[in-house]
Image (tube, helix red, strand yellow):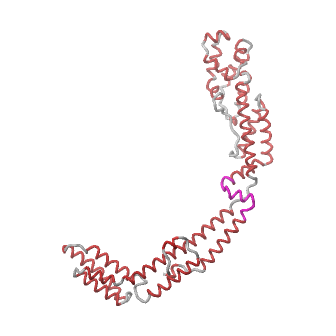
Amino acid sequence: MDRSRGEMSAAPTADELQALAGAISELMQKLQKTPGLAEGHIERVAASIEQILRDYGGASYRQYRNLVRDLDAAAAEVARHTKAGTIAPKVIRIFDAALLRIRKRDFFLGRRLVDKLGKLRAQARERDRLLGEYREGYRGIERDIARLRAERDRLKSVRRPPMAESDVARVKQLLEDANRALVRAWVSELHDVPSRIAIATLLEAATERKLLLPTVPEPEATALLDLLNTDGPTREGFGNRGVHGLLEALSYSDAKLAHLIGDGRPLKAALQANLTWLKVITAPTDPLPRLSLDLPIEDLRDRVGAIAPFAARLHAASDLQANLSDIAQRLTSGEIARAQEADRGFRTHGDDARRAWEGTLEGAIRAIEHDIESKVRDLAGLRPPERLA
């Protein structure tokens, strides 16, 4: 069969493998005319003699003992095949003659005798090469079938998402809008609302642990709140400021505080006692929890339930309250749970989940099953490599 190795490096078709099997069978018929050729006995003996020629071709006479040792091993192998009749007599004679010439250190003639078997050995090597190509092509079809079956099973495991990807995006946007509204309300509470009112709101919210707010030491916070609510210069100067403005009092000198409110030491002492949690709530990144579709549905429901009463106490949270009401309704209707399931499906399976939603995935599965059936038929029409060897 006139076929180059480069052409067969590409995945061969079933027809090409059929033709290759025919070429291998023809070669096998030729090889079987010479006992020992198809089985590889001649190749192994010839290779061992060639190894001796390479090892001792330029060796000195002091290595003659090693040469005789290796020649005796090769001669014993030839004798075993002679006794078993597994190598053709004409080849046995060539091997015997070659071993005899090499023993007499006539390496040139020994090599010439082994070279006489070149055409026979070339046929055997060509058979092995073609058989290797056939075996690889056959195994390639088997691998393709296994890969297609795995792909079919994977696609069958892809369920149709309960919601379109665009609807999932709208639910995510709703949660993100609620997060932004919460941040705006929080910032407004700390900047625009008088600190004596805002701190009271924070004290109430701190008791709800699901809001993740810092723990507030109640006696110290109550003392600060009483100081800010008591009529006098402290209430007028700092109680009506936002929480951020209240913390500026710590940077004032005693003289400046005395000018503003008289004795400023009680205010500074109260602020120092509450400084830890005041720093947390006024940090650039606010401590409030976020709503996310990645949360377990029960955690998301609990978080919405905790934020809703807090939003009712904030002073600039009308948008937040509307968003939370919408989210609560969607939680009750199961829409957010469906959005979570669909989001997991789209993120896990990507385009396959999109095709499942569009209804085109079944067609892809049928196309794969058709390919599997075609390749199974191709494989059934080929002989296993073991039967060609």
| The quarter of the displayed image where residue 359 is located | bottom right
Q: Is residue 296 above or below residue 38?
A: above
Residue 329 at what x, y percent from top left?
80, 43
Which residue is at a point 66% across and 74% down the rendered structure image?
373
| The quarter of the displayed image where residue 61 is located | bottom left
Q: Nearer the viewer, residue 186 or 42?
A: 42
Residue 154 at what x, y percent from top left?
65, 62
Q: Is residue 359 left or right of residue 105?
A: right
Residue 184 at what x, y percent from top left?
72, 32
Residue 347 at what x, y percent from top left?
66, 52
Which residue is outermost to the left? Answer: 62
* Magenta highlight on residue 151: no
Q: Is residue 92 left or right of residue 353?
A: left
- Count of labels shown? 0
* Magenta highlight on residue 360: yes
Q: What secondary structure prevails in the magenta region?
A: helix
Q: Nearer the viewer, residue 343 or 382?
A: 382
Which residue is at a point 68% across and 34% down the rendered structure image?
288
- Give the residues drawn in magenta, as a range: 346-362
